[in-house]
Amino acid sequence: MKTTLNIEGMSCDHCVRHVSDALKEISGVKNAAVSLKEKNAVVDHEDKVTLEAMKAAVVEAGYEVV
C-alpha cells in the first residue's frame, strides 16, 4: 500500500533524511521516498500502518503534514 503525505518545513537534504528516517522507523513501513522539490513523502507500507502514525512521526521529527 502507498500513501502520499504533503510535508511543510523541509528546506535541505538533511530535512529529507530526517523525515525519511522517522517514517522508516515505523513498524510496517517498507520504504519512504521523500522529495524536497515536491514537498512530499511517498510511503510504501503494510495495511496495518495508520495515517495517524505516519503523521505523528513527521510531526515528532519537527515538520508539518498538510
Image (cartoon, helix red, strand yellow):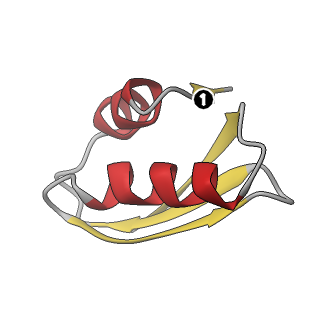
Q: Quadrant of residue 50?
A: top left
Where residue 13 appears, as percent x and y from the top left, is 68, 61
Name the residue located 43 percent from the left edge and 32 percent from the top edge: 55
Q: From the viewer's perspective, is residue 48 above or below residue 61?
A: below
- On-image quarter of the C terminus: top right
- Say which residue label 1 marks: 65
Q: From the viewer's perspective, is residue 26 above or below residue 24?
A: above
Where residue 60 appears, as percent x and y from the top left, is 37, 26
Q: Describe residue 37's horizontal placement relative to residue 27 as left or right.
A: right
Name the residue located 35 percent from the left edge and 49 percent from the top edge: 22
Three-letter residue code for mark 1: Val
Name the residue located 30 percent from the left edge and 61 percent from the top edge: 24
Where residue 3 appears, as percent x and y from the top left, is 51, 56
Q: Describe residue 58's horizontal placement relative to residue 63 as left or right.
A: left
Where residue 33 appears, as percent x and y from the top left, is 56, 70
Name the residue located 67 percent from the left edge and 38 percent from the top edge: 7
Q: From the viewer's perspective, is residue 13 above or below residue 54?
A: below
- On-image quarter of the N terminus: bottom left
Q: Residues within 10 Å of mark 1 (few under 14, many from 20)?
A: some
Taking the view exactly as shown, the residue that stands out farthest to the right is 37
Q: Secondary structure at mark 1?
A: strand
